[in-house]
Amino acid sequence: MPASVRKFLVVVDKTAESKVAVRFAARRAQHTGGRVSLLCVAHPVDFQQWGGVEEIMMDEAHQEAEARIYDAAKLINELTGITPELIIAHGEETEVLLDLIAKDRAISILVVASSGAKEGPGPLVKLFATKIQAIPVTIVPGNLTDEQVDELA
């Protein structure tokens, strides 16, 4: 991939604002000739009683991550014709994300959507807005409608 092609990274999770970030990244990539990478993290299972049960729980977490990332990829492809890069990883979301950003130098922008919850804008927004300055971050309001995202991007 030429260095001039923007690669937008989005973390896909269960939140409603994740869908806003996916749509925004897809539209920005479409309008700028960029690419989209989707990261979905299957969270580690903290269950050590029986090995077989732990393995089943890990498989279920991986299957949930697959379903989530495939839904996001389908949306991107239907909206823009872009086939995104899909990355499913296991571990803690922050560690996986930082490792990916460090290893994949083609990633130019992390796209996150802020949460409107009382607890604050969301953990990724807080992390990249205050502590980590490893990559440019686009923060999209998580309460935007599809039409607003399409107009804005």
Image (cartoon, rainbow, N blue to C red):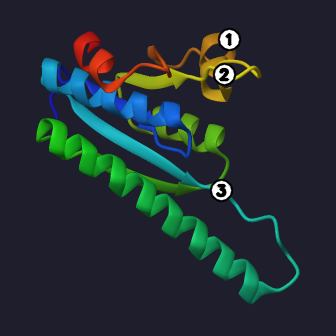
Note whether residue 106 is visible. no
Q: Secondary structure at mark 1?
A: helix
Estimate the spatial distance between the alpha carbons at disc 2 and disc 1, rounded to whole Å: 6 Å
Q: Amino acid at mark 2?
A: Leu
Q: Amino acid at mark 3?
A: His
* 152 in relation to 82, above or below: above
Q: Residue at x 31, y 19 (%)?
A: 149
Q: In x, y percent, where is residue 30?
A: 15, 26
Give the camera-side residue of 76 and 43: 76
Q: Which residue is mark 2?
A: 127
Q: Which mark is drawn over residue 138?
A: none
* Among the two numbered marks 3 and 1 on one chain, the one whose residue lies closer to the N terminus: 3
For the residues labelled 2 and 1, say whether their Cβ atoms are less than 8 Å apart.
yes
Q: Looking at the rendering, which quadrant does residue 82 occupy? A: top left
* 12 in relation to 144, above or below: below
Estimate the spatial distance between the alpha carbons at disc 3 and disc 1, rounded to whole Å: 24 Å
Q: Which mark is drawn over residue 130?
A: 1
* Structural crowding at the residue carrying mark 1, measured as other residues with C-alpha within 10 Å and reported as few (<14), some (14–19) or many (≥20): few
Q: Which residue is mark 3?
A: 43
